[in-house]
């Protein structure tokens, strides 16, 4: 049977990026996506929005208990269709930008031009997005990525040299400077101490400017009006300009022949040429550096915070992590990070705007103006997708690669996170380096619930843990213990 959600939209709701009021049409469709459980009547959007912001754990649970397709009515975002079935999510991620786009929706959620610039991977759409991303991607994958691992380790060791061992600390906050230094030194690649110190300040200023209460309120106001960004964003604009000035100075030096000893993303982008032999523009390079900083900093620090929170509550996992790392094998550390991202991804959902009629494989058609929201977090905690989904079991990923459409913390398709491989390698190295030198110890508090830092889901107390210094003798005796097998831990 075929159902078409082709109820004509009022003129102001038609066209790319428009907000479609689909709920009425959905309710009368034979393939009705359900409403979010607990939805008693239209207009529950305010309740859902309040929950989404203030009680994310409750909101996620509601999404997990919802039908595989459900309507979600967040004010300003219009009626979105939440998708929890990997098959639907695959279809969305593999559909091209002539039908589904990212920027038609993301422009409602943040002021693109001021933060990322129009001339950027995050701002582009369609063929231009595809070709620029394809050109830029090698700077964060393969050989280039392997060459950054030494820097990941060094930045972690520098932070550990100043670590307050034996004291309970908010781990997420404590590892954040490592993630920042990694971006500054392996992505922007600044090594001159004076310039690095200015860059650090400018980067922190920009990150602060997009985290103020003023900006949060401006965002709510603009989003509620469907993405009208007419506020005063002078703080963000000034912080971006100051950051760009440092990046511009670095680019000037490189062009004058001052090349870095170690590879970095900026240099690889400077060396890249389009098929017509053209270099990337300076504006594109400035925007890319700012975009990678914003997209890559908080996500990584937060995931490491969740990792600390989860491993300290699973002694067998911690034990196996120490044993494998001591034997020189970091693959289990990567499985730990992979499982953390399944259970606690930083984002609940991603989105795509329908710009031309989109038909699901079962025949349901959506008209332009609809917004699809692949529910990344709820899907990865769905018992139909993962066995015992609430259990933290890195063993799921020891001998098995994560499924492209069942493990989606980085989204998917042509808009998949550009820093996915980079951040996995980064977190694996940071975690293994810490475990080589220190033992994680849980603080005697209940497991932390899910809190929020803007759109990112964080451990509510920032993952309070204690690190105790590991002596070489402790490492040797840990290594002498018989290693536990995956099946011994999980029964899998
Ligand atoms: C735990 C770490 C991270 C997570 C969970 C994460 C997650 C995501 C997600 C969900 C998206 C949207 C994808 C989609 O809708 O299909 C995204 C986009 C993006 N991320 Fe990440 N991210 C992480 C780290 C990073 C890092 C380290 C960088 C760079 C240094 C980065 C750069 C980007 C960029 C540039 C995009 C936009 C891609 C595009 O529009 O084509 N991310 N990320």
Image (tube, rainbow, N blue to C red):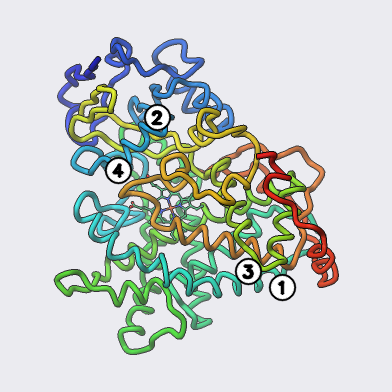
Looking at the rendered image, the quarter that the N terminus falls into is top left
Provide the residue designation for mark 1. Answer: 161
* Mark 4–mark 2 distance (CA, rounded to whole Å): 16 Å
Q: Is label 1 in a helix, a strand or a loop?
A: helix
* Mark 2–mark 3 distance (CA, rounded to whole Å): 38 Å
Ligand 1 within 8 Å of disc 4? The answer is yes
Residue 334 in percent (x, y) is at: 58, 56
Q: Which mark is residue 156?
A: 3
Ligand 1 within 8 Å of disc 2? The answer is no
Provide the residue designation for mark 2. Answer: 83
Looking at the rendered image, the quarter that the C terminus falls into is top right
Q: Is label 2 in a helix, a strand or a loop?
A: strand
Between disc 4 and disc 2, the foreground one is 2
Q: Above or below — where is 64 with respect to 152?
A: above
Choose the circle earlier in sequence order: 4 or 1: 4
Provide the residue designation for mark 4. Answer: 102
* Mark 3–mark 4 distance (CA, rounded to whole Å): 35 Å
Residue 378 in percent (x, y) is at: 50, 32
Q: Nearer the viewer, residue 125 or 217?
A: 125
Q: Is residue 446 left or right of residue 375?
A: right
Between disc 1 and disc 2, the foreground one is 2
Q: Is residue 34 left or right of residue 319?
A: left
Q: Is mark 4 in CB contact (under 8 Å) with mark 2?
A: no
* Mark 1–mark 2 distance (CA, rounded to whole Å): 45 Å
Choose the circle earlier in sequence order: 3 or 4: 4
Q: Residue at x 51, y 36 (%)?
A: 380
Residue 280 in percent (x, y) is at: 24, 70
Residue 46 in sight? yes
Where residue 91 sits, quadrant-wise, is: top left
Rate crowding at label 3 as few (under 14), some (14 to 19) or many (20 or more) other CA atoms within 10 Å: many
Q: Residue at x 21, y 37 (%)?
A: 99
Where residue 389 sits, quadrant-wise, is: top right
């Amino acid at each position: 049977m075929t159902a078409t959600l082709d109820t004509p939209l009022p003129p102001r709701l038609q066209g790319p990026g428009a907000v479609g009021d689909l709920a009425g049409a959905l309710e009368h469709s034979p393939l009705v996506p359900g409403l979010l459980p607990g939805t008693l009547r239209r207009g529950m959007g305010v309740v859902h929005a309040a929950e989404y912001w203030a009680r994310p754990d409750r909101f996620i649970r509601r999404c997990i208990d919802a039908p595989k397709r459900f309507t979600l009515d967040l004010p300003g975002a219009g009626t979105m269709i939440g998708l929890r079935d990997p098959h639907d999510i695959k279809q969305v991620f593999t559909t091209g930008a002539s039908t589904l786009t990212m920027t038609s929706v993301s422009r409602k959620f943040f002021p693109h031009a001021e933060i990322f610039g129009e001339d950027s991977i995050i701002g582009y759409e369609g063929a231009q997005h595809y070709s620029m991303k394809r050109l830029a991607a090698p700077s964060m994958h393969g050989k280039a990525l392997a060459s950054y691992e030494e820097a990941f380790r060094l930045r972690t060791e520098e932070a550990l040299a100043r670590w307050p061992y034996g004291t309970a600390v908010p781990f997420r906050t404590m590892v954040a400077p490592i993630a920042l230094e990694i971006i500054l030194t392996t992505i922007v690649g600044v090594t001159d101490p004076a310039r690095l110190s200015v860059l650090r300040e400018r980067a922190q200023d920009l990150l602060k400017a997009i985290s103020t209460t003023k900006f949060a309120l401006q965002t709510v106001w603009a989003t509620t009006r469907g993405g009208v960004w007419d506020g005063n964003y002078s703080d963000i604009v000034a912080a971006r300009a100051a950051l760009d000035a440092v990046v511009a100075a670095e680019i000037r030096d490189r062009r004058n022949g001052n090349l870095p000893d170690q590879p970095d993303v900026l240099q690889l982008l400077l060396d890249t040429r389009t098929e017509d032999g053209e270099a990337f523009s300076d504006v594109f390079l400035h925007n890319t550096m700012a975009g990678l900083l914003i997209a890559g900093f908080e996500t990584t620090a937060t995931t490491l915070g969740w990792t600390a929170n989860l491993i300290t509550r699973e002694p067998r996992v911690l034990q196996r992590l120490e044993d494998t790392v001591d034997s020189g094998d970091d693959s289990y550390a990567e499985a730990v990070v992979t499982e953390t991202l399944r259970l606690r991804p930083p984002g609940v959902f991603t989105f795509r705007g329908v710009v031309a009629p989109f038909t699901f494989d079962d025949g349901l058609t959506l008209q332009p103006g609809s917004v699809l929201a692949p529910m990344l977090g709820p899907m990865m905690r769905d018992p139909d997708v993962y066995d015992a989904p609430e259990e933290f079991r890195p063993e799921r990923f020891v001998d098995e690669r994560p499924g492209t459409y069942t493990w989606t913390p980085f989204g998917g398709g042509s808009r998949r996170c550009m820093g996915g491989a980079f951040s996995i390698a980064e977190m694996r190295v940071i975690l293994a380096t810490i475990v080589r030198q220190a033992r994680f110890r849980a603080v005697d508090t209940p497991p932390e619930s899910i809190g929020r830092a803007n759109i990112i889901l964080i451990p509510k107390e920032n993952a309070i843990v204690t690190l105790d210094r590991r002596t070489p003798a402790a490492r040797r005796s840990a290594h002498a213990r018989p290693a536990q097998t995956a099946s011994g831990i999980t029964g899998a």
